[in-house]
Image (cartoon, helix red, strand yellow):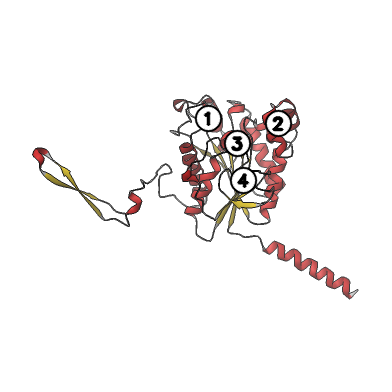
Amino acid sequence: MKRLFLSLVFLVGGLLGAQAEVDPNFYIYLCFGQSNMEGNARWESVDNTVDDRFKMLATCNFTSPKRNLGEWYKATPPIVSPWGGLGMADYFGRTMVAALPSNVKVGVVDVAIGGIAIEGFMPDKIAGILAKADSWQAERIRAYGSDPYQRLVDMAKKAQEAGVIKGILLHQGCSNNGNPNWPKMVKSIYDNMLKDLGLSGDSVPIFVGETLYKNQGGSCYDHNKVVEKIPEVIKNGHIVTAEDITGNGQDTWHFSAAGYRIFGRRYAFEALKVMGIEPKMDPEYQMNANLKKFFTPKSVATPIQGYHNQIKKLILSCTY
């Protein structure tokens, strides 16, 4: 009897210890959608430097780089799947860790599939979508256990063992371009996630990005009229604008690498605003490399050539 009692004590103690390992300063964001969320741009050398505080949870198995399903890694691209590239979540996470206190980590749990309709994240619809999918898309769906929604929920539960879910990011639409029922379908998925993960909509917002604008070469721009309905349907729903973000110049659906960097920052700025942290820098601003060499400059004196070969000095006052 004593041995049984001691075993129970150790078991309960072990469970309590496991619960205590959840880090309240590890902020988790769930991400889902189609190719722009999966990442369609090839990352560049500038994208290879990532803060150790930004993590990704592998939602499928990777071969190159080698990553195992359900394990955490430093968020170097590709962070969604072996087929993905630079996408929305990359600079979302980088901006978040830059803006938050140094003791806060940020992790993304991302399931996204190129060309998938929003119905692909509905468990009762995915079988029909898989049956009609092209071979390349079917391969990606199967990489998520043939049920992208359930894989996202399973990995989200895994993430809850380590941190706290703070929000959800969505970028999807071209495969449902202009469908007036789209906001209600998004709400259904969102509500199911909250229920399945024991979350409250009051504390877990969803951030929904617009599609490529017409003046940037986009063909799904009509969908933005549908996206703007999200805050009317979801109380804690927020829109992330795609205005003036450049396309890749190769097709009519995807953003450029520079565009993904800007869009990721915009997602982060919306998330920070919801947290009560007002961003002080414009999300599109990128400091010139030469300016970074200055340390808190007060003024810059630059000689310039004036009329009749006279040398003048142009004084530029700078404050930070």
In the picture of the structure, the residue carrying the numbered disc 3 is: 233
In the picture of the structure, the residue carrying the numbered disc 4 is: 65
In the picture of the structure, the residue carrying the numbered disc 2 is: 138
The disc labelled 2 sits on which kind of residue? Answer: Ala
Disc 1 to disc 4, how far (Cα)?
35 Å
Residue visible at 46% across and 38% down in the picture: 258
Disc 3 to disc 2, how far (Cα)?
31 Å
Q: Disc 3 or 2, which lies upstream in sequence?
A: 2
Instruction: Report whether 175 appears left or right of 222.
Output: right
x and y percentages locating residue 108 in the rendered image: 60, 48
x and y percentages locating residue 146 in the rendered image: 74, 36
SS category of the residue bearing label 4: loop
The disc labelled 1 sits on which kind of residue? Answer: Asn
Disc 4 to disc 3, how far (Cα)?
40 Å
Disc 3 to disc 1, how far (Cα)?
15 Å
SS category of the residue bearing label 2: helix
Name the front one of labels 2 and 4: 4
Residue visible at 70% across and 45% down in the picture: 153
Question: Circle 1: is it few (<14), some (14-19), or many (20+) Cα within 10 Å?
Answer: many
SS category of the residue bearing label 3: helix
In the rendered view, would you say 15 is above or below 311? below
| Residue placed most toward the observer, 58 or 2 | 58
Asked if the residues shown at circle 2 and circle 1 are in contact, with their CB atoms under 8 angstroms apart, the answer is: no
Q: Looking at the rendering, which quadrant does residue 33 occupy?
A: top right
SS category of the residue bearing label 1: helix
In the picture of the structure, the residue carrying the numbered disc 1 is: 224
Single out the residue that lies furthest toward the right: 1
Question: Circle 2: is it few (<14), some (14-19), or many (20+) Cα within 10 Å?
Answer: some
Q: Quadrant of the N terminus?
A: bottom right
